Amino acid sequence: MQQTPPLKEHQLIRLFLTVATLVTLVSMFVFAITKGTRNELSLTPDREGIVGDSLQIQSVHDIGEWEFLTLSDEELVDTTASRLLGSDRQLTRIYYGTLRLGVDMGKLSPGALRLVGDTLDVTLPPIGLLDDDFIDETRTKSFHEKGSWDEASRAALYQRAKRQMLSRCLTDRNLSIARQNAVEEVSQMFHTLGYSYVNVHFQP
């Protein structure tokens, strides 16, 4: 019996590409049929639906914290304490902070992603502060210090600096900028995943 000669390397590559192409076409055909039979689909991790969508929603949750605006701030805070005898004590310190505004994608509510026709509606959690420990204490400087101060006094000064940074940075304008950045970046991500039309909203 005559033996069939083994396939050469270029023949194996051609065979592999042919099989891969057939598998891809079949997958696209099945996906098109399945998608065409659904006018509305809630893309949630616990719902049985299109496998690809389940993987995509899980990938969105896995993103975790998504930062849309970073704000750097420095605050000069001082305090004075009077003495009955002697001169007053004074303490002035400079604090540096980095506030990050964004959303935690892991907190998407059920039904946050809904496919209606060919439009994907995305409802994000409200824009907020991602990290409450935004003051970099390693960069804190004592601008002026007169007399002795205990840890409680320094801690009170730290909290004042923190409140000032929140008041200066968490403005309506900055929150609006962060929301606009979120709309653009989230839309771009889903466009990359193959959705032509994306509407991004925020929970109240």
Image: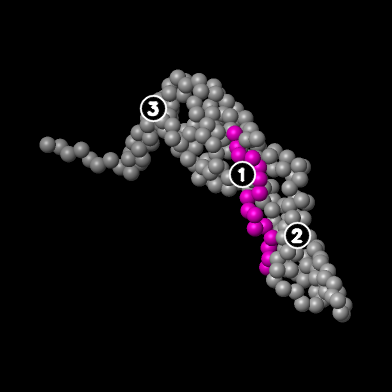
Which image quadrant is residue 148 in?
Answer: bottom right
Q: Name which residue type carries label 1.
A: Val
**Label 3 to label 1: alpha-carbon separation:** 37 Å
Q: Secondary structure at mark 1?
A: strand
Which image quadrant is residue 199 in?
Answer: top right
Q: Name which residue type carries label 3.
A: Val
Residue 164 shows in the view: yes
Few, some or many residues within 10 Å of mark 2 (<14, 14–19, 20+)? some
Rendered location of residue 198, percent (x, y): 60, 30
Classify 100 as above or below 113: below
**Label 2 to label 3: alpha-carbon separation:** 63 Å
From the image, tell me which residue sits under label 3.
26
Classify 56 as above or below 168: above
Q: Secondary structure at mark 3?
A: helix
Few, some or many residues within 10 Å of mark 1 (<14, 14–19, 20+)? many
Residue 144 shows in the view: no
Identified at 83% across, 69% down, the residue is: 80
Asked whether 166 falls inside the magenta stretch, the response is no
Identified at 80% across, 74% down, the residue is: 145
Among the two numbered marks 2 and 3 on one chain, the one whose residue lies closer to the N terminus: 3
The residue stretch that appears in magenta: 123-139
Classify 57 as above or below 29: below
From the image, tell me which residue sits under label 1.
103
Q: Considering the image in quadrants, where does the C terminus appear?
A: top right
Q: Specify whether 91 is left or right of 175.
A: right
Q: Considering the image in quadrants, where does the N terminus appear?
A: top left
Among the two numbered marks 1 and 2 on one chain, the one whose residue lies closer to the N terminus: 1
